Amino acid sequence: MKFTRLALAATLAAAGAGFAGSALAQAQEQFIPLLSYRTGQLAPLGIPWADGKQDYLKLVNAKGGINGVKITYEECETAYDTSRGVECYERLKGKGGGAAGFDTQSTGITFAVTDKAPADKMPVITPGYGLSQSADGKVFEWNFPLLANYWTGADAVVQDILKQEKGSLKGKKIALVYHDSPYGKEPIPLLQKRAEKEGFALQLLPVTAPGVEQKATWLQVRQNRPDYVILWSAGVMTPTAIREAQATGFPREKMYAVWWAGSDHDVKDIAGAKGYKTVTIHNTAEHDKIHDEIKAQVYDKGQGTASDVRELGAMAHTRGMVIAMLQVEAIRTAQEKYGKGKYMTPEQVRWGLENLNLTQERLNELGFGKILRPIKTSCENHLGTDWQRIAQWNGSKWEVVSDWYQADQSLVAPLVQEYGAKYAKDKNIKTRTCN
């Protein structure tokens, strides 16, 4: 496997320094591994996502690091393949004295790494993806599905459909067209609960990866004539689905996509995408101070990761920045407890993730005040408060078309507890007691 070394600060080890020099480097630098997929079926999503993470880390270093601690990183290509992702994890987890945690960028990789994390004492950070039940910090001590999970996202979609239908879905039909993988199957338990509660018929239509052949699926859509389609896809599967919907005459304004199927690259070259909707975990329509800072301090200095500065503000790029910011703020939070200006161990970073408190004031300072709502985590709650909105493609850009939604916890919380308890039993995990 070919790995690309992308470091923002030179390491003393590379200059042949001895053990003492390496220890000094660890005290001055914080290593963040960057799993990515710039190749493979999901590359259209993975490239801007990876660019956004790198650009934010470059900005942090340009501003002096985290209380003076500079960030180093190494990008490792997974091609969205679980075995390759695990190989990246094993290779990078001990680097720099211990990685600051892994944003795996894959539900399948998350499943595999979650089994390893407790023994390795390694944080697994999955904003908007991963195992939905890992919101339960009593069971999943090392997992942090920050901001939202697939159950909260699916619930927000149903809430918006309910709004379109004046509060009743009785007798309606909703089809889930989904990537036939652990990722694609994640929303099914929540949608089944919602179907039971609201009285609509749920049709499940799996699509074999990578999703470039969907004619049979959309033939079923045309035959069954659902009132709405929820699309759980990513990468090349998404534009294929939009084009097939257009070919079969299914109205795009009746399609709702998960956030990984709602990026600029998914729709901008498709004339028939107008009206297509996506649920999103940040305010898609807004640019904020963070975009201006990265342009001025990274791109204007010729250090931008993306080949085109116009990628700044694209949804997947912004989400990459959001994820990197959450990791940096977890390290900063840990420093408040364990020592400002010091390298934080993986265990200390885990404490920072569990004690995040990003107020509106702090988000404004970071330049994300228009993009995110406040987030606060705890021992019990590794997700924080979920907030989702609906955005719609108007033919040239995304427009937010809903207020902020929060998931119905009377449905989501029991699922988190049920699936969390099952996981604990299957893996023989002793649940924590949170004070």
Image (tube, grey):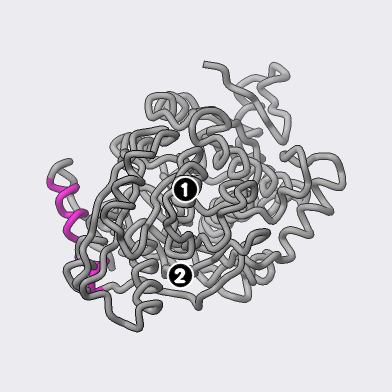
Residue 204 left/right relative to 290: left
Q: Is residue 97 above or below residue 405?
A: above
Q: Which residue is mark 1?
A: 247
Say the numbered circle drawn on residue 131. none
State the residue in front, 148 or 21: 148
Q: Residue at x 42, y 59 (%)?
A: 354
Q: Against 18, is 80 above or below? A: below
Kindly indicate the quadrant of the structure image that contains residue 20.
top right
163 in magenta: no
Which residue does the numbered mark 2 point to in the structure image?
A: 387
Looking at the rendered image, the quarter that the C terminus falls into is bottom left
Mark 1 residue element:
helix
Looking at the image, the residue that sits furthest to the bottom is: 166
Q: Position of residue 165 (x, y in %)?
A: 35, 78
Between label 1 and label 2, give the one nearer the viewer: 1
Figure check: 252 above or below 19: below
Going by the numbered disc 1, the residue's amino acid type is Ala
Looking at the image, which is closer to me, 116 or 15? 116
Q: Earlier in the sequence, mark 1 or mark 2?
A: 1
